[in-house]
Image (cartoon, grey):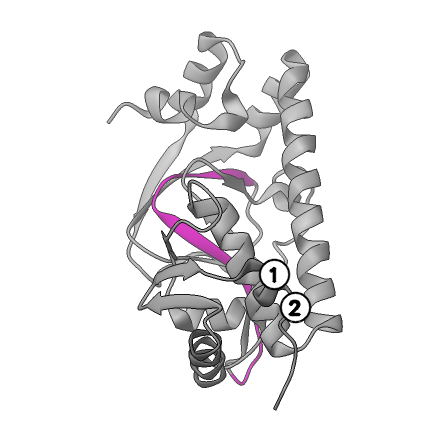
Amino acid sequence: MDTFRLLRKTPLFSGLEDEAVMALASRARLSRYEPGERVISRSDETQAFFVVLSGRAKIFRSTPDGKEQILYLVEAGQPFCFCSAFTDRPYPVDVAALEKSLVAGIPSEDMEDLARRQPILLLKIMQTLAGRLLETMNLVESLALHGTQKRIACFLQHSEGCCAARPGDPFSLHISHTEMARIVGTSPETLSRVIQKFKRRRLIEASGRNIRILDHDGLAAAHETE
């Protein structure tokens, strides 16, 4: 398996010299995960930096009674585990594969050494962290200030922006309804009821994971009516 080629395709490492990426590839440890398999557990004392090379993973927190809140979906080509890679603190969340995934783990000392020699890497890390912070702030606002219907509507609009070629084009969600419910902070049953309500009001078309937004203004104005 060409680890160098896989890392070179990762946006975080674009712009770096081939020699630097080859050095990381030689130290990277590749691991395969099945759907639902834990990649990192909360409080693990790992001193490594991770990149999803293929597949998809979720970053989440869970309670002893099994309630789960997904904080971020890590797509192929995206890194995670920044906070434990550059500090000596335990990892504060859990990470699990959503589908068959290939993950590269790179020792922290190698990332630190490369960052000192190639400052562009630090800039890319800062840009990635800024984007994650913005998405997290939007998630917190949605969960704290909006009702269930509004949260689901916002998620569908965000997904269209990420997955559809143009507004109004059909797109496919890359996660199950159960995972989507965990992201928006509700139950799968409530999610299904809201999706059906949106369909009856002709705001969306939906069949399984396939979605098409029919009325963007109407969906944006979605509010609690129960």
Q: Position of residue 113 (x, y in %)?
A: 61, 20
Which kind of residue does numbered mark 2 sit on?
Ala
Query: Residue 217 or 5: which is nearer the viewer?
Result: 217
Which residue in the protein does label 1 denote? 217
Q: CA distance from mark 1 to mark 2?
A: 6 Å
- Tell me, yes or no, if residue 6 can be seen here: yes
Q: Which residues are magenta?
A: 48-65
Q: Position of residue 59 (x, y in %)?
A: 53, 57
At 68% from the left edge and 70% from the top edge, which residue is drawn?
143
Residue 193: image quadrant is bottom left
Frontmost residue, 37 versus 75 = 75
**Residue 28 in the image: x percent, y percent?**
41, 30
Name of the residue lying farthest toward the bottom: 226
Proximity of marks 1 and 2: CB atoms separated by less than 8 Å: yes
Q: Is residue 202 magenta?
A: no
- On the image, numbered disc 2 is attached to which residue? 221
Q: Secondary structure at mark 1?
A: helix
In the rendered view, tell whether residue 19 sits above or below residue 169.
above
Secondary element type, mark 2: loop
Question: Is residue 56 on the magenta stretch?
Answer: yes
Which residue occupies 44% across, 35% down? Answer: 77
Query: Please, what is the three-letter code of the amino acid marked with disc 1?
Result: Asp
Image quarter (top left, top right, bottom left or bottom right) of the N terminus: top left
Q: In front here: 169 or 72?
A: 169
